[in-house]
Amino acid sequence: MSTFPAFSVNSAKDPQGETSLTPPQGCGIFSVSFSPQDVAGRWWQIETTTTYFETPGKGNTEEVLRLVRKRVQELGIKAVVIASTGGDTAAKATELLGGIKVIAVGLSAGWSAPPGHATPRMFTAENRQKIESAGGAVLTTTHAFAGIDHALRAGTGTSLLNIIARTLNIFCHGMKVVCEIAVMAADAGLIRTDEDVIVIAGTGRGADTAVVLRPTNSTNFFDMRVKEVLCKPHYPAPHLPAPAGQAKPGE
């Protein structure tokens, strides 16, 4: 994890006040304070931090889980949803988040890797037993942003769900996945849609992205609300040219 400048946005305590942007002396987080007004006319403030990782990938997994554990305790989160192919990341989360329900969302049966990518191993029996014995669940189902729509795209080049997926990928690959697996878990009845959850995903293996969100079912997808971004890669698109003087991730 590298160090990037951070700054704090301080909103006024009253409607006539001014909003200020104050850069501190530089640190590895981006701290935002904001003050929305509730229906009673009172003003309140939330301060959160977002950690940006220098490169995406599984090397960030332990730090992601540390950040998630801290926020779970602060917010009283009851369930964590995590993308996991072989189950290693979900098993680690189960150990670290003792007492919290972990829902591991794996690849759908019959999923095939894109050309040039190795097909990941599926959930191991050992990892499944570890998660389920702790009160968690392992979900294998159709991907919310794929399924029949994926077949339509392959056959005709047309895909509405791919537009949603590629738009979320602007933030990072993990941002697409957290929204997708939250819907999948909600549709399976494994998480409530009237309580916040923390959702974890990554780029390839492991974890590098975590958010606090209010989930929805797929029929109400656009009612989903991503409330907090706990962490994400700072420069998550290795196919784009890196800024001058900055190497691409992995270089």
Image (spheres, grey):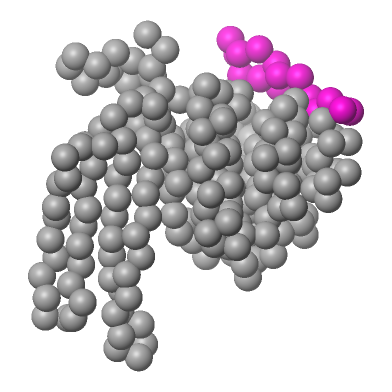
**Where 246 falls versus 188 (above or below)?**
above
Queried whether the magenta region covers residue 180, the answer comes back as no
Q: Is 183 left, or right, of 49 in this rendering?
A: right
**Where 53 falls versus 199 (above or below)?**
above
Q: Quadrant of residue 128 in the image?
A: top right
**Residue at 55% across, 39% down:** 66
Q: How many marks?
A: 0
**Where 141 falls versus 118 (above or below)?**
below
Q: Position of residue 117 (x, y in %)?
A: 61, 13
Q: Is residue 158 visible?
A: no
Nearest the eye: 158 or 171: 171
What stretch of residues is rendered in magenta?
110-126
Quadrant of image for the C terminus: top left
Q: Position of residue 211 (x, y in %)?
A: 50, 49
**Residue at 66% across, 12% down:** 118
Nearest the eye: 33 or 249: 33
Q: Position of residue 51 (x, y in %)?
A: 39, 39
